[in-house]
Image (spheres, rainbow, N blue to C red):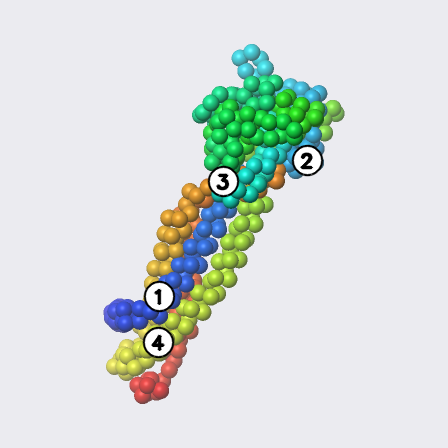
Amino acid sequence: MKAIIAVTALNLASISRRMGSSLVIVIGIAGVVGVMISVLAMAQGFIETMSHTGQPDRAIILRGGSEAELSSTLTRDQAIAIAGGPGVKTDAEGHAIQSAEVVAVLNLPLRATGTDANVTLRGVGPQAFELRPDMKLIEGRMFQPGLREVIVGKSAQGQFSGLELGGHVSLRDSQWTVVGVFDTPDSHGSEVLGDVDTVLGALRRNLFQSVTVQLENADGFDAYKQALTSDPRLAVEVMRETDYYARTGEQLGKLLKFIGYVVGSIMAVGALFGALNTMYSAVSARTVEIATLRAIGFGAMPVLVSVFVEALLLSLVGAAIGAFLAWAFFNGNTLNSLSGNFTQVVFHLDVTWPLVGLGVAWAAIIGLIGGLFPALRAVRRPVVEALRGG
């Protein structure tokens, strides 16, 4: 053990004389870790936003076979039957806490680029805020039923132009006035809300696209679902609200993770070759030194460990720099991406400790592989040949 420590310390002390080549490993690993963590943070942030949308004691009902609200239609009679299902919570006046809703798509310019993007306009019922108590009005006032007024999510307001108080958005041939701003921690903060009947009138429709109901408790979901799916008047898909939004975000989340791993792997190959080249150069520069150590009695193991430790240490320094840069420049940044309704969902990049740990592990693997072959070369070369500098 003393021999390993002595040889390793001697090796690390010589890094300063090889600073230029050592920086090749550090910079290469920092790039790999920084890019991979940043892309995976996008996936993490999007999945977190979608998975935190909804509550397990709320159910969303679509037409049978529909994957998303845009492909669903429900009649008013169906909406009444859905709200009257067993286990639906009622308010103080005995009315079911529910919201029959319709979704439309608005085209609004992004603040950052000025290019148009799709934004969800959701027509909601009068109990929408009682149904979703985490939704809070923070500026202005609530829209008035029957008037072409909307309230906008704080996240949407931050990303899109024209959503300031007093601003106007276009729907078909009509202008709608922004009268309030609301905040919510989930994906609904990316939406624009208006009165459902007024929105239906502007769209010249008479069909809802979803109904969301508040159940008395989460355990009542199975009985509620069984009652609705066995009702001959209905042909519906009944899901917990949490499951619906988690499923909606799953596909894009998987795509972003796939991109992160692919890009990280491609960059890792480049960093690996850089590490191999650097460590081979380091071993070549220390050929006589290593041979002398072996000639005076140091075995192969201390030399092997010293090369591995150098490669691993440089890789971990690069990983720390890359993770810090990803956190400093990207953690909490706001982005927007398409949701299951082909509209934009605003979310925040989330650089978590598990992602940092993954980046460090990735860097350690690159460093260990990068040090393996140079280490084997250092101990396999004949001592006499190495001392001659051949």
Disc 2 crowd, CA 10 A, few/some/many (<14, 14-19, 20+): few
298 is higher (above) or lower (below) than 50: below
Is the residue marked by circle 3 packed among few (<14), some (14-19), or many (20+) residues within 10 Å? some
Q: Secondary structure at mark 2?
A: helix
Looking at the image, the residue that sits furthest to the top is 93
Residue depicted at x 53% and y 57%: 262
Task: Specify the amino acid type for callout 1.
Answer: Leu
Foreground residue among 335 and 382: 335
Query: On the image, numbered disc 3 is attached to which residue?
Result: 111
Sequence-wise first label, 1 or 2: 1
Q: Which residue is mark 2?
A: 71
- What type is the residue that disc 2 sits on? Ser
Q: Label 3 is placed on what type of residue?
A: Arg
Q: Position of residue 128 (x, y in %)?
A: 55, 23
Q: Earlier in the sequence, mark 4 or mark 2?
A: 2
**Residue pointed to by mark 4:** 283
Instruction: Assign a secondary structure to mark 4.
Output: helix
* Whole-percent x, y for residue 13 in the image: 25, 69
Q: Distance between the Cα atoms at labels 3 and 2?
A: 29 Å
Q: Quadrant of the N terminus?
A: bottom left
Tell me the tag on residue 143. none
Mark 1–mark 2 distance (CA, rounded to whole Å): 54 Å
Image coords of residue 326 (percent x, y): 41, 51
